[in-house]
Amino acid sequence: MAKKPISITIDETLAEKLAKIAEDTHRKKSFFVNQALREYFEEIEDYDLALERRGGKSTPIIKAGKELSL
């Protein structure tokens, strides 16, 4: 899979936790950011699918994320 560098700003507490876990596990911070985003989007997609199955209107991923306060 191709990779694309991005720049983000996160809370200092999150940055410290990210740096600590990366150091402790000898992995790159980007590994954990990628994993977190992957899991976040999977959760949103599952939520959207559940709405459809209950007969509700399917919502765009972004709207579902706001409804879940994610």
Image: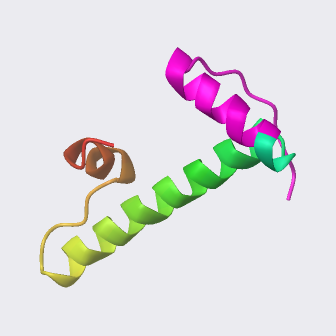
Please tell me whether residue 50 is drawn above or below residue 61 in the rendered image: below
**Furthest-bottom residue in view?**
53
Q: Position of residue 28 (x, y in %)?
A: 83, 41
12 within the magenta span: yes
Residue at 65% x, 34% y is 18
Q: Position of residue 37 (x, y in %)?
A: 57, 49
Q: Which residues are magenta?
A: 1-23
Residue at 38% x, 59% y is 44
Q: Position of residue 3 (x, y in %)?
A: 84, 45
Residue 12, by quadrant, is top right
Query: Dividing the image into 4 quarters, which one contains the N terminus?
Result: bottom right
Image position of 3 (left or right of 32)? right
Residue 38, by quadrant, is bottom right
Image position of 65 (left or right of 33)? left
Query: Dividing the image into 4 quarters, which one contains the C terminus?
Result: top left
Residue at 33% x, 53% y is 60
39 within the magenta span: no
Please tell me whether residue 63 is drawn above or below residue 17 in the rendered image: below
**Furthest-front residue in view?**
24
Residue 24, by quadrant, is top right
Image position of 35 (left or right of 30)? left
